[in-house]
Image (cartoon, rainbow, N blue to C red):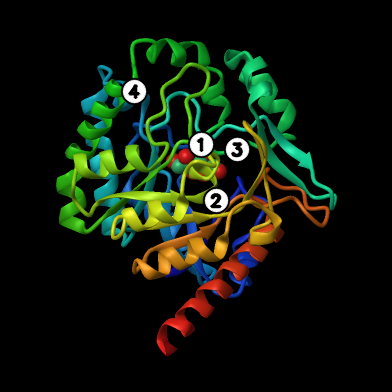
Amino acid sequence: MDMGLRWYGPGYDSVSLEQIRQIPGVKGVITTLYGKQPGELWERSEIHALKETAKQEGLRVLGIESVNVSDAIKTGGSKRDEHLQNYIQTLENLAEEGIFLVCYNFMPVFDWTRSELARVRPDGSTVLAYHQAVIDRIDPKRMRESIEEMSDGFVMPGWEPERLDRLEELFSLYREIDGETLFKNLVYFLKAIGPVCERYGIRMGLHPDDPAWPIFGLPRIITGKESILRILKAVDRPYNGLTFCTGSLGSNPDNDLTDIIRACRGRIPFAHVRNLKYNSPGDFEEAAHLSSDGSLDMYEIMKALYETGFDGVIRPDHGRMIWGEKAMPGYGLYDRALGAVYLEGLWEALEKAGKSG
Ligand code: DNO
């Protein structure tokens, strides 16, 4: 298992590589080429430069989150094949640079969604939160205003202004796309990238939908055990894997996280491990990683990963904003560092118990 921290790159992240390097046990970063539009080709020289930046600080690029999939690929639009060629070439360029883990999602229009970016918890920390009634009142096409107001000037992954400017157009692209069509387009994508993934040993980690149910009338297709197994079986090859995101799947209390991990044995190359707290149906808030601070049992989750032979990358996920830090919501340094070390502690205990038992 390699522990990594997500890093947005120079100019995009308030957290530095030097700070990341000082978190015990963190071997590298999960990063991306920010500024690249979905569908665009990533040149090998650009990937190399990214890798060198990390290397100069003694860190590896453990994986990419994300090489985003374009709307043409998701909807089967006219530019699908051109974008697929670029995606395939990008994967090859990444592999040539020694990067073999790629996370992506297949959510229409919106990536992860929250209704609040700074809900105050009893200890004064602030967290991302979701309240269905608030989401139901939002006009999704005016999301730009809501996000700008909420995010304190930080640009968040999946919520880039270029995207928010095109919401009207994006909604119309998905007008005819139901869950089944989206699923078929995902299979088409996975089959198309199969040869390059198999040639280089690339592991793709499909990120579940967050929250794990349809929102704003848009379909969402990776929401729980059944839908995950369906896609893993539709393209039943090791390269077709899952990014096991506890916070996304855990947004639905009906999802049994450890059961999903066991059902996906061998197909989880990447895990986002974090906690959240359910307040009432449709209302949850993120919490510290520690089990007792939220509703998820981190020990059981790490144990299921350990027992199924997980050998990929784990990163702590959204952290609380604590100690006066000002950073991108969910992606400050302090609480994610606490999370990383806590998860490493659980892993160390599991490994030692495993060896002695
Ligand atoms: C949010 C993240 C997502 C994730 C993408 C993967 O914090 O978990 O933005 O990176 O959905 O493609």
Question: Does mark 3's beta carbon lie closer than 8 Å to ligand 1?
Answer: yes
Where disc 4 sits, the SS reads helix
Q: Earlier in the sequence, mark 3 or mark 1?
A: 3
Q: CA distance from mark 4 to mark 1?
A: 16 Å
Q: Position of residue 107 (x, y in %)?
A: 42, 30
Q: CA distance from mark 2 to mark 1?
A: 24 Å
Residue closest to the eye, 257 or 342: 257
The image shows residue 198, relative to residue 22, as above or below, that is: above
Q: Quadrant of the C terminus?
A: bottom left
Where disc 3 sits, the SS reads loop
- Mark number for residue 179? 4
Residue, disc 2: 9
Label 4 or label 3, whichever lies nearer to me, is 4
Residue, disc 1: 210
Question: Does mark 1's beta carbon lie closer than 8 Å to ligand 1?
Answer: yes
Q: Earlier in the sequence, mark 2 or mark 4?
A: 2
Q: Amino acid at mark 3?
A: Met
Q: Write down the quadrant of residue 22 in the picture.
A: bottom right
